[in-house]
Image (tube, rainbow, N blue to C red):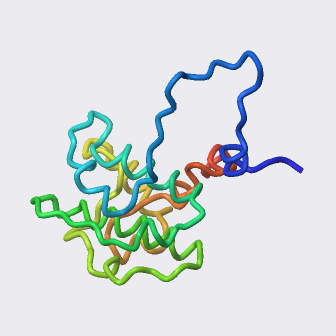
Amino acid sequence: MAMTTKEAVRNYQPRPGDYVPRRVVTRKDLTAADLPPLMVVPDPRGSYRYPLLQFIVDWNLSDDQARLVAEPPVYDGDDPVLLPAIAVVVHALAERAGIPIPGWVFEHRAPTDVALFVPDYMPKYAEWLKRRSHPLSNYHRVHIHPRMLDKGTDDWWLPWD
């Protein structure tokens, strides 16, 4: 039986001849509370893209997913979509995993419908995404493709539609 990505990451052992760095850098999994300061850093691909996708990977590889969402994210800036974007991802991941949905998730809704990771100059793609978005997207008014939640799993590279 094939090993899952999570098992492969956990069980990796260097073989003779493999390059092994002198110093191993470790990092902790991103939590929902870690995301706001990372999501305001300017990025030409979209400020939310890297932090949210890394959070999803960390979630999918974590043994303690509830810990990743226990502390609510705090943001006092003027971006009305930042916290709803985190909330829709956490809401969908927690529901899929069958863990209790944190209460803070229900407090965050965008003022208007937004297609996550879709630039303003691509309105047809935004409409396409909204038609296929995760069912919880309507509550938060931040539309995400359901397959985005598979980042870090063995199913990530399967066709999306």
Q: Number of marks in the image?
A: 0
Q: Nearer the viewer, residue 68 or 113?
A: 68
Report whether 122 appears left or right of 4.
left
Expressed as whole percent of the image width and height from the top left, the position of residue 44 reads 27, 33
Report whether 97 appears left or right of 119.
right
Q: Residue at x 51, y 32 (%)?
A: 24
Occupied quadrant, residue 21: top right
Q: Nearer the viewer, residue 43 or 118?
A: 43
Expressed as whole percent of the image width and height from the top left, the position of residue 48 reads 31, 49
Occupied quadrant, residue 33: bottom left
User: Hey, which residue is sitting farthest top in the picture?
Assistant: 17
Expressed as whole percent of the image width and height from the top left, the position of residue 17 reads 74, 15
User: Hey, which residue is sitting farthest front in the picture?
Assistant: 22
Report whether 126 appears left or right of 93.
left
User: Hey, which residue is sitting farthest right in the picture?
Assistant: 1
Report whether 119 appears left or right of 100.
left
Expressed as whole percent of the image width and height from the top left, the position of residue 90 reads 43, 68
Q: Nearer the viewer, residue 143 or 59?
A: 59
Q: Residue at x 44, y 65 (%)?
A: 68
Vertical arrangement, residue 23 with respect to residue 28, above or below = above
Q: Nearer the viewer, residue 114 or 84?
A: 84
Q: Residue at x 59, y 55 (%)?
A: 61
Q: Residue at x 48, y 70 (%)?
A: 92
